[in-house]
Amino acid sequence: MRDPDRLIIDRSPGETRIAGLSGGRLTDLWLERAGTPPRRVGEIVLARVTAVRPELNAAFLDIGHGEAFLNLGKRKAPAEGALVAVTITADAAGRKQAQASRQVVLGGRYMSLRPTETDLSIAGAIKAKGKRDALKEMLEPGRPEKIGLLVHETATDAEKIQLLSDLATLLKEWKAVEDAIVAGDGPKTIRPAPTAEDVARALFPSAAVEESSNGAGFADDDVDGQIDRALARRLQLANGTALTFDETEALVAIDVDVAAAGRAPNGWAQLFEEMAPDIAAEIRRRRLSGLVLVDFPRLSQKSDRERVADAMQTAFAGWPLGGGDNEQPPQVLGWTRSGVLEITVQRAGRSLAEDYLRPVEQHPRAATVALAALRRLLTETGGIAHPEMICAPDIADWLAGPGAKALEETKERLGGTLRLTPQTDYALERIEIGPARR
């Protein structure tokens, strides 16, 4: 699985899109848009325990902007009503609550404070024993005994004063958290979630970054076309096979259709092995998560099934992880008795379809169409003194509500004039742009 070599950050009214591309092919897409719940993954919250469920080995939390589910693992259950510091590990999606972890990491420039751990650790990239020993000798006296510390590779060339200042700042921040717990001051956000841009840059620091506006940077590589392809329910592959994707609340089903592939010259098992990287790439590109069932045509030989399962697990090698101790790549669990390959993918939030499409009908959301129309206005109305956009009432309603700020920004960039005309007989995706009619 290849990481992107380029990141295109495209900003337009009401929306920021970040595309990760490897050799021009879309690998990842991050989205921040008006009217969509903000991304909370990575946010550190002082949460209040609202219920403890021993039968689930879990607790439910009030995180100030909703509720979250906390798996207790082997840790002692907190008391109901208590305040606990947690990190949001998965956004709410559909009917699923946000998920939280007791692992809290306060990241600084040169190190990360880990209050739920106890050791001082040095990044493995710092290999010189003398340097590692010097860092430990410098930082150990200022580290409280029961608070963990991880020194990053960036500390290699830092001055002593910079390192000690970074440590002091992190300890001060954690002291404020402890004081808030004692005072009963919560629930509240301690540290906001990183932005989509922060996440993309941190995951892929070697990727070249390109800035774009109004979709211009997406044109050369047909990123919008690649997004449409990643939203399609049925996807035709180059080898003649086709994949059909169905997302439900409980699971994701991927049906493998080989009807147009002809006879596999070296057997179906080899064909399915060769398809594994494509399937893994689509799971990543579409942000599919939870239980994923891949329905290959049945293989009678156990050895063939094992070959395909191994190829699928190998295809997930290099899956991007954010660095949390609880993160793991997708796991291939094996074949069900009915002959379906079972995979689990750790959930982090909404899928691409949930961001772009309305549920059930699988038609574009009004926000998706409206924001694309604003980009068109900025690129197609040059020389038009008084532009007009004619659209469906749902589009006009969204622009008057959640998208009002984006609409105003577009008007300002057009010189302050734009007539928006709802047309009752227009389909959602029908947008007409031109000079204002008299």
Image (cartoon, rainbow, N blue to C red):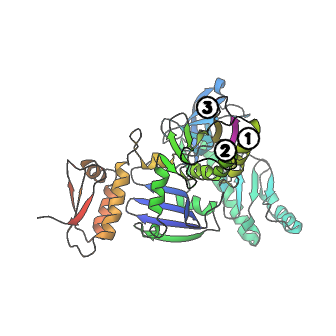
Residue denoted by label 1 = 304
- Residue 104 seen anywhere in this rendered image of the structure: no
Q: Residues within 10 Å of mark 1 (few under 14, many from 20)?
A: some
Relative horizontal placement of residue 279, taking residue 228 as reference (left or right): right
The residues bearing labels 1 and 2 have C-alpha atoms spaced at a distance of: 9 Å
For the point 37% across and 48% down, the residue is: 365
Image quadrant in which the C terminus is located: bottom left
Residue denoted by label 2 = 268
Say which label, 1 or 2, has the lower sequence index: 2
- The residue mark sitting in front, 1 or 2, is 2
Residue denoted by label 3 = 59
Q: Are marks 1 and 2 in contact (CB under 8 Å)?
A: yes
Q: Residues within 10 Å of mark 3 (few under 14, many from 20)?
A: many
Residue 46 location (% of width, % of height): 58, 43
Name which residue type carries label 3: Ala
Badge 2 element: helix
Residue 420 location (% of width, % of height): 22, 58
Badge 3 element: strand
For the point 65% across and 38% down, the residue is: 341
